[in-house]
Amino acid sequence: MSIDHSVSPAASAPARDDPPALDVRGLTYRFGAKTAVDSLDLTLAPGEIVGLLGPNGAGKTTAIRVIVTLLRPAAGSAAVFGVDAARQPIRARRLIGYVPQMLSADSGLTGRENVALFAGLFDVPRRHRRARVDQALAAMGLTDVADRLARTYSGGMVRRLELAQALVNAPRLLILDEPTVGLDPIARDSVWEHVLRLREEYGMAVLLTTHYMEEADVLCDRVALMHAGRVRATGVPGELKAALGPRASLEDVFRHHTGGALAGNGNGNEAGDFRGVQHTRRAASRVG
Ligand SMILES: Nc1ncnc2c1ncn2[C@@H]1O[C@H](COP(=O)(O)OP(=O)(O)OP(=O)(O)O)[C@@H](O)[C@H]1O
Ligand SMILES: [Mg+2]
């Protein structure tokens, strides 16, 4: 079974002159005196998978919460397929599927009830709800366990249930905040397999965060390296690695653009070559 986009307000096929799936410009958010997101720029093309990578506290979740309209930016804007998240939050939300970093499934409800709850929250027309819930559960491989309480699910199944919740409004932009944290490698693969299939079948754009660099390397068309509220570098993983050296990994790229500052190596070589990165890594391990 597949997700039926024909009944979605977001169903129109992407046209050549479609606006970006996501267009974030100068986005700024402050918690009191703390600037968590600092003039962030980020763009996603329709159908593109982009990884937002960065150390703990970089501002990834805060940026995402502004994009999904849960927080209002202090400055800048985020537009989803041309719909401004701050000015037209309801329209923007209809285009977005969101799996938050914190678990969002209710363990006291069945899988089906959890997805149905989201169908109601996201205004899926009543007459389509039952079919949409079934489709979303089937797309995540949960049909057989749909009537079991979510508390009996494994961690991987819970994450797939949350993906089903995010899919039930047939979004055109899927935003996943650490969807595979704490999962074993097989469950992680299963989540990504489902995400990739969705992209292939429906051309959804996907913005994801993960601390697993190998995953980001394999999955993402592009990555954006975020540190202290700003995007420090963005590009195709292969090109970012090649810019550092022939044997550089995405983890080296990550450390180069984020870890160097954390290690405070003070050698003024933050933008240096692969050897500079190795130096930074040694400094980082010394600093502890
Ligand atoms: N509710 C809050 N009140 C005050 N400060 C906050 C709040 N939420 C986040 N912050 C601060 O904002 C900054 C960015 O946090 P955020 O959760 O966006 O980071 P992150 O990149 O998602 O990190 P992680 O990888 O750990 O999930 C951090 O310094 C954090 O302490
Ligand atoms: Mg986070």
Image (spheres, rainbow, N blue to C red):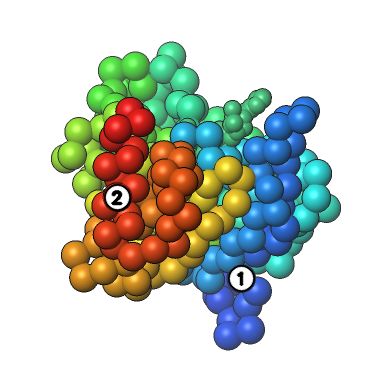
Q: In which quarter of the image is residue 122?
A: top right
Residue that lies at the very extreme toward the top in this rendered image: 108
Which residue, given by chain and number where applicable, does mark 2 sit on? Answer: 279
Q: Which amino acid does label 2 sit on?
A: His
Q: Which residue is drawn at 23% across and 45% down?
A: 190
* Number of marks drawn: 2
Q: Earlier in the sequence, mark 1 or mark 2?
A: 1
Image point 44% across, 62% down: which residue?
A: 271
Q: Which of 4 and 83 is in front in this view?
A: 83
User: Residues at badges 1 and 2 in contact (C-beta under 8 Å)?
Assistant: no
Name the residue that disc number 1 marks.
20
Quarter containing the C terminus:
top left
Determine the secondary structure under disc 2.
Answer: helix
Front: mark 1 or 2: 2
Q: Which residue: 76% across, 30% down?
A: 33
Between the residue at mark 1 and the residue at mark 2, the CA separation in whole angstroms equals 39 Å
Q: x, y percentage for residue 220?
A: 36, 61
Local packing at callout 1 (Cα closer than 10 Å; few below 14, some 14-19, many 20+) is: some
Q: Which amino acid does label 1 sit on?
A: Pro
**Label 1 lies in ligand 1 vicinity (Cβ under 8 Å):** no
Residue 251, placed above or below residue 137: below
The quadrant in which residue 121 appears is top right
Disc ID at residue 146 = none
Q: In the rendered view, tell whether residue 210 sits above or below residue 196.
A: above
42 left or right of 135 in image: right
Residue 130 relative to residue 214: left or right:
right
